[in-house]
Image (cartoon, rainbow, N blue to C red):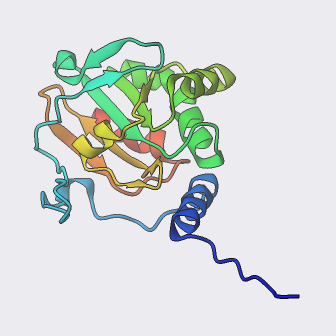
């Protein structure tokens, strides 16, 4: 009897690696350079790395409830656009709960919050309902919003990165590495500065 050797495809290995990263994303990331010192540069694939002082991309955010918000319509308000890998996974839940639990302070700081990932409206709605999130989630199934902000999408999961947009419509702070447990406090401190 002949033995058949099965080799997994590269696409399957990449998908499994992406899933493992999304599901095990509670580990503490390596500290990143200061948000205000990131260079505005090309990443070689045509995307741009936003830095403090750059204009925020004027994208239209499609929310979980079907409504749309043009980012430029929020001029005069501070806005947090945060990208996360996947609804209802450990790190993403901790991050969202931190924002929920700090909601009174976030509102007092006049901060609008939008969470962005590549899941659809049904997944986002279930995540919001399960954890009683007081802010909308953005549907970015095609990754267009992530590309506009220069956020890498690995497999089908957006990297965990955040952008604080000032009242003037310019990037105030960026976080290329985010600790889900400290995210809300870090953003709130930047919003108050």
Residue 12, percent across and down? 58, 63
Would residue 143 appear left or right of 59 to someone viewing this image?
Answer: right
Location of the C terminus (image quadrant): top left
Q: Nearer the viewer, residue 141 or 193?
A: 141
The image quarter in which residue 118 lies: top left
Q: Residue at x 45, y 68 (%)?
A: 30
Q: Residue furthest front?
A: 1
Residue at 19% over, 54% down: 47
Quadrant in the rendering for residue 167: top left
Residue 32 image position (x, y, % from top left)? 35, 64
**Left or right: 26 as drawn, with respect to 137:** right
Q: Nearest the camera: 32 or 102?
A: 32
Q: Quadrant of the N terminus?
A: bottom right
Residue lying at 27% horizontally and 45% vertically, measured from the top left: 147
Residue 52 coordinates in the image, percent (x, y)? 16, 47
- Residue that appears at 61% across and 39% down: 93
Report whether 76 appears left or right of 106: left
Q: Is residue 41 above or below residue 98?
A: below
Q: How many marks?
A: 0
Residue 1 left/right relative to 41:
right
Measuring from the top left, give residue 46's x and y in whole percent: 16, 56
């Amino acid at each position: 009897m002949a033995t058949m050797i099965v080799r997994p495809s590269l696409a399957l290995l990449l998908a499994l690696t992406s899933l493992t990263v999304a599901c095990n994303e509670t580990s503490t990331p390596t500290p990143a350079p200061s948000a205000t010192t990131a260079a505005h540069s090309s990443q070689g694939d045509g995307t741009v790395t936003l830095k403090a002082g750059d204009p925020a991309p004027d994208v239209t955010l499609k929310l979980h409830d079907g409504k749309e918000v043009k980012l430029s319509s929020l001029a005069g308000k501070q806005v947090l656009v945060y990208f996360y890998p996947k609804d209802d996974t450990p790190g993403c839940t901790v991050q969202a709960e931190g924002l929920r639990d700090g909601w009174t302070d976030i509102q007092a700081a006049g901060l609008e919050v939008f969470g962005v990932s590549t899941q659809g409206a049904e997944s986002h709605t279930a995540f919001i309902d399960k954890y009683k999130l007081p802010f909308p989630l953005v549907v970015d199934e095609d990754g267009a919003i992530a590309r506009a902000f220069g956020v890498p999408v690995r497999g089908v999961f957006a990297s965990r990165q955040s952008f604080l947009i000032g009242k003037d419509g310019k990037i105030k702070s960026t976080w290329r590495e985010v600790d889900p447990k400290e995210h809300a406090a870090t953003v709130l401190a930047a919003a108050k500065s």
